[in-house]
Image (tube, rainbow, N blue to C red):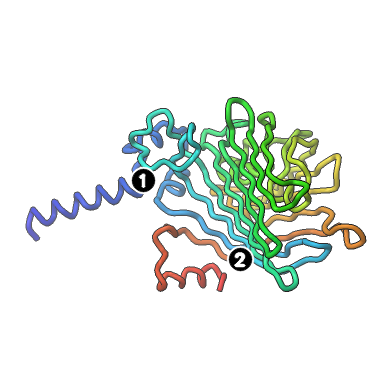
């Protein structure tokens, strides 16, 4: 092998490493973070963590089978535009490393299907009120809704688009508060930052859409239980009947094993207290954004989604 070929191979390896973001020292935004080598090795390897779950979703006073997927990945984000950066190296102080969660649920209610999704964008240097953006959408045969929450100037600006007359198109403001939706990203960044005791928290955007409750801070209490391998974080709302429990690995990388949501499902005489459950099925690390060819559908089989 000639020196020229060796040089080309070495150069290619450097380029690949830079693209994948594996070398913290070569990324000025990444290098400024106070993260462990263990965290860096797992979350800065140029892949996302994809986990599928067997879902039992409460809706219309019944429990419907389906599946859920949690997709966690770190990205470079714009503080001002609150979108993924195209050129992180030139963003300067506007750039921030975030933990992104794309959470999806799919289930059928009778003849028609539901497809629901949330996206949460939380800086890795988390502190209360630092989540920059959350979006939530729900699609089914009656119509669809979309909500977007942006952290701007000390407030959360909430935009709601809905096919329901009573909701219509809304633009509201919420004082920056703890968000139920960011509990998931807090766990993956560092669960020591999870709030405890009696707290004020804004319920999940998707729950607000399913229940048609306005989004605002609500009183809740936290019950935290830990064993050698599993920690259960339970959130009980104090002024209405709803509880959320997230069960996750007590050790890094704090992967989420399962969750439960208990609340009143259905309307009128069909309303009853039910529990939505999701239990981990498969978990893989994958650069899924590059797996878009027909042949790549094998990865859905790996996640048991076929």
- Expressed as whole percent of the image width and height from the top left, the position of residue 268 reads 90, 58
- Labels 2 and 1: the sequence-earlier one: 1
Q: Quadrant of the N terminus?
A: bottom left
Asked which secondary structure carries label 1, the reply is loop
The label number, if any, that marks residue 205 in the structure image: none
Residue sitting at x 8%, y 53% = 3
Residue 259, placed above or below residue 64:
above
Question: Which residue ends up furthest to the top in the rendered image?
Answer: 153
Viewer-nearest residue: 150 or 121: 150
Which residue in the structure is indicated by mark 2? Answer: 281
Q: What separation in Å lies between label 2 and label 1 (alpha carbons)?
A: 29 Å
Can residue 54 be seen in this snapshot?
no
Viewer-nearest residue: 189 or 109: 109
- Expressed as whole percent of the image width and height from the top left, the position of residue 289 reads 43, 58
Q: Does residue 261 appear to the left or right of 255 in the view shown?
A: right
Q: Quadrant of the C terminus?
A: bottom right
Asked which secondary structure carries label 2, the reply is strand
Which residue in the structure is indicated by mark 1? Answer: 21
């Amino acid at each position: 092998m000639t020196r020229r070929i060796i040089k080309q191979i070495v150069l290619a390896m450097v380029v690949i490493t830079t693209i994948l973001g594996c070398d913290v020292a070569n990324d000025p935004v990444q290098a400024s973070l106070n993260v462990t080598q263990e965290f860096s090795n797992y979350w800065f390897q140029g892949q996302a963590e994809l986990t599928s779950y067997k879902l039992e979703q409460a809706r219309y006073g019944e429990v419907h089978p389906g599946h859920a997927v949690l997709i966690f990945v770190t990205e470079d984000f714009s503080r001002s535009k609150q979108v993924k950066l195209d050129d992180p190296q030139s963003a300067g102080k506007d750039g921030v490393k975030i933990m992104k969660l794309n959470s999806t649920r799919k289930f059928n209610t009778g003849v028609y299907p539901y497809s629901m999704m949330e996206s949460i964008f939380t800086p890795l240097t988390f502190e209360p009120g630092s989540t920059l953006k959350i979006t939530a959408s729900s699609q089914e045969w009656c119509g669809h809704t979309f909500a977007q929450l942006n952290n701007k100037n000390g407030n959360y600006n909430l935009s709601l688009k809905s096919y329901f007359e009573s909701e219509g198109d809304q633009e509201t403001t919420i004082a920056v508060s703890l968000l139920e939706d960011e509990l998931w990203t807090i766990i993956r960044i560092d669960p020591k930052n999870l709030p405890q005791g009696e707290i004020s928290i804004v319920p999940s955007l998707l729950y607000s859409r399913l229940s048609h409750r306005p989004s605002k801070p609500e009183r809740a209490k936290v019950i935290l239980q830990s064993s050698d391998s599993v920690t259960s974080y339970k959130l009980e709302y104090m002024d209405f009947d709803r509880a959320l429990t997230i069960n996750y690995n007590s050790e890094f990388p704090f992967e989420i094993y399962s969750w439960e949501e208990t609340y009143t499902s259905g309307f009128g005489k069909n309303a009853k207290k039910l529990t939505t459950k999701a239990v981990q099925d498969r978990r893989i690390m994958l650069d899924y954004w590059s797996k878009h060819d027909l042949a790549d559908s094998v990865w859905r089989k790996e996640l048991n989604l076929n």
